[in-house]
Structure formats: C-alpha cells, structure tokens
Image: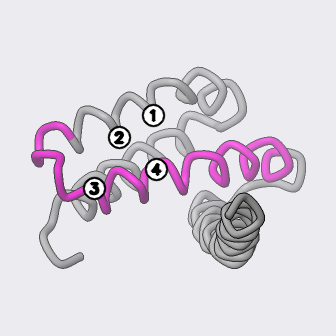
Amino acid sequence: MKNHINLITAAVCVGTFVLLATVLPVQNEAAMLKAQAISQQLNLKPQQKAKILPILVDEGPKVQAIKNNNSLSKMQKIQQIRAIHQQTDPQMKAILSPEQYQKLQGIRRQAIKDATQPYH
C-alpha cells in the first residue's frame, strides 16, 4: 500500500512538473512578446531596452493573472494592476524620457481598460 502511495505521489509530482514546464515558458514568451511590442511603441534606445524589458517581462504575467481572475471585481482588477505599475513606476520614470514615460502611461491605461473588459 505504501508503495502505491509513493508511486501516486511521484506521478502527481512529475505531472505537475511537466505541466509547469509547458505553461511557464509560454507565459514568459507571451510576456516577452508584449514587452518587445511596448519597447517598439516607446522607440527605446538599446540601453533603455536592456533596462526596461526585464521590468516589463516581470509585470506581464502578474497583470495577466489579474486579468484572468474572474473572482475579482472590475475595481479590484484596476486597483491591483495600478499597484503593480506603481511598484515599477520610479524605475521607468528614471529610464525613460518624459515623452516616452507619457506614452507608457497611455499604454498602461489601455492595458487596464483591456483587463477589465469582459471576453477580452
């Protein structure tokens, strides 16, 4: 009986690992693609891109998780996404020109709007 439990536990662990191994790279890839698109919209210089991309890639899955969380109200989604943006805002402002920063604010406002739209 003990061997059966160990075997089942091992199978569940392996299954979980395989699932995570397939899901996480897809999320990271999607986050990277979105970050690349934002960096193009902002017309980043290479040195800016090197600093901004890791921040955007880190934010992407967090925002997506909030967007996909159907237990949150529209207002809760807005508040949580804004909180994520506020955490990285000082870094972004220090790296971007004032024009780029204003454009980023517009992109972020649109991301919040998109995240709170049903079936989006």
Q: CA distance from mark 3 to mark 4?
A: 27 Å
Name the secondary structure under disc 4. Answer: helix
Residue at 41 percent across and 55 percent down: it is 65
Q: CA distance from mark 4 to mark 1?
A: 18 Å
Q: CA distance from mark 2 to mark 4?
A: 17 Å
Q: Magenta residues: mostly which secondary structure?
A: helix
Name the secondary structure under disc 1. Answer: helix
Label 3 or label 2, whichever comes before in sequence order: 3
Q: Which residue is mark 4?
A: 103
Q: Is residue 92 above or below residue 4?
A: above
Residue 35 sits in quarter:
bottom right
Q: Nearer the viewer, mark 3 or mark 2?
A: 3
Q: CA distance from mark 2 to mark 1?
A: 5 Å
Name the secondary structure under disc 3. Answer: loop
Is residue 45 something one can see in this rendering? Answer: yes
Name the secondary structure under disc 2. Answer: helix
Label 2 or label 4, whichever comes before in sequence order: 2
Label 4 or label 1, whichever comes before in sequence order: 1
- Specify the segment rendered in magenta: 48-76
Q: Which residue is mark 3?
A: 69
